[in-house]
Image (cartoon, rainbow, N blue to C red):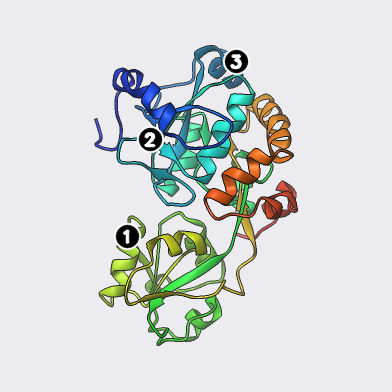
Amino acid sequence: MRKNEISRRQMLRTGGAAALALPVAGFLAGCSFTQPGTGQPAGSTLDQIKKQGFAQIAIANEPPYTKIEPDGTVTGAEPDVVAAVLKRMGIPEVQGVVTPYESMIPGLKANRWDIIAAGLFMKQSRCSQLRYSEPQLVSTESFAVPAGNPKKLTSVAAVKADPAVKVAVLPGGFEDGALKTQNVPAGQIVNIPDGRSGIEAVQAGRADAFFLPTLSLESLKTDGIEITPAIDDVQQTGSGAGFRMEDQDLVNAYDEQLRALKASPEFDQILSKWGFSADASRKVTRDQLCSVAG
C-alpha cells in the first residue's frame, strides 16, 4: 500500500469523522483516501456509483485546487464542488486517490477512478481524451521568482528569449504543456514532483522561476520568493470534473446538478473559501476552455 492511500476498511472506520471535518456550507460528504479500483464493474459508471454510494476521484495535493488535511480528509476547491454536486445526485461520499497529473487521464481510462477532480485544466489535447463537465474553476498563471524578479520574467516569451533561463514545472501539468506549446526548449524545463519542490528549486538556483497557477503559488509563498502578476501570453484556463468518454450519461446528470449548484449561494461559498471567483466560472463555457491550445 502506498503511504498516500488508506484501505477501504480504514476509510469506513474514519468516514464519519471525515464527513464532519469537511467545512463546506450546505453539505456533508465523507472524503478520504482509498485504494484505486481494479476495474469498472458491469453497468454504467453512473449506475454503479449510485448503487455503492460513493465515487472515487483522482486528485493532486495542490492547494487551493486540492488539499489533503493531516487527518486524511480530501478537500480543496475542486473536490468540494464535486462532492456538493454528487450529493445532489444522491451520491453522499467521495474517496480521493492522489496521483501525478500525467497519470490522471490514463488512470481514468483504466478504470482506476471514476472522476478526475484535481484542477486539471481544459485544453484541446485533454478535451479530445475525456469528457469535461461545464467549468467549475477559472484561473490565471504566474511565476514564483526570487525577490525582485532578477530575470524580469513576466511571460513565456521572456523565457524563450533567454536560453539560460530555466523554469520548474509539474510534469503533465497545464504549465508544462503551455511551455511546450510555445516551443520552449526541453533544456529550459525543470521537472519537479510537487509544489514545495518547485519553490525549493528556485531558492536553490536550480530554476529561475516556478510556473504554476497564481493561487497555488500564493499558498506556497515564502521569504525571498515573490509571485509575478498573471502571465500575459498564456490563455485563460479553467477546469471541470473529468469523465471517461463513454460516461456521457454521468456527464449529463452531473452537469444538470452543477447548473443548479452554480445558481445557488452554496457555489459562491465554496469557491470564495478557496480564493476563486464564482462569477468568473459562470461566464465561460466548456467549449471556450476546450479551445485553448495545447
> Does label 3 or label 1 sit earlier along the sequence?
3
- Image location of residue 267, percent across then percent down: 64, 41
Q: Quadrant of the N terminus?
A: top left
Q: Nearer the viewer, residue 235 or 213?
A: 213
Rendered residue at 39%/22% (across/down): 16
Q: Quadrant of the C terminus?
A: bottom right
**Total residue callouts:** 3
Q: Which mark is residue 72?
A: none
Q: Nearer the viewer, mark 1 or mark 2?
A: 2
Rendered residue at 48%/80% (across/down): 159
- Image location of residue 170, percent across then percent down: 40, 58
Q: Is residue 201 left or right of residue 132?
A: left
Q: Is residue 180 left or right of residue 124?
A: left
Instruction: Give the answer, above or below, for where 161 lies relative to 266.
Output: below
- Quickly name the residue at label 3: 47
Residue 291 placement: quadrant: bottom right
Of the residues shown, which amino acid type is indicated by label 1?
Arg
Q: Nearer the viewer, mark 3 or mark 1?
A: 1
- Image location of residue 172, percent across then percent down: 45, 54
Spatial CA distance of label 2 from label 3 is 26 Å
Q: Nearer the viewer, residue 29 or 108?
A: 29
Kindly state the secondary structure of the residue where label 1 is placed: helix
Rendered residue at 51%/16% (across/down): 53
Q: Is residue 191 left or right of residue 45?
A: left
Kindly state the secondary structure of the residue where label 2 is placed: loop
> Does label 2 or label 3 sit earlier along the sequence?
3
Of the residues shown, which amino acid type is indicated by label 2?
Thr
- Image location of residue 67, percent across then percent down: 41, 45
Spatial CA distance of label 3 from label 1 is 39 Å
Q: Which mark is residue 196?
A: 1
Kindly state the secondary structure of the residue where label 3 is placed: helix
- Quickly name the residue at label 2: 73
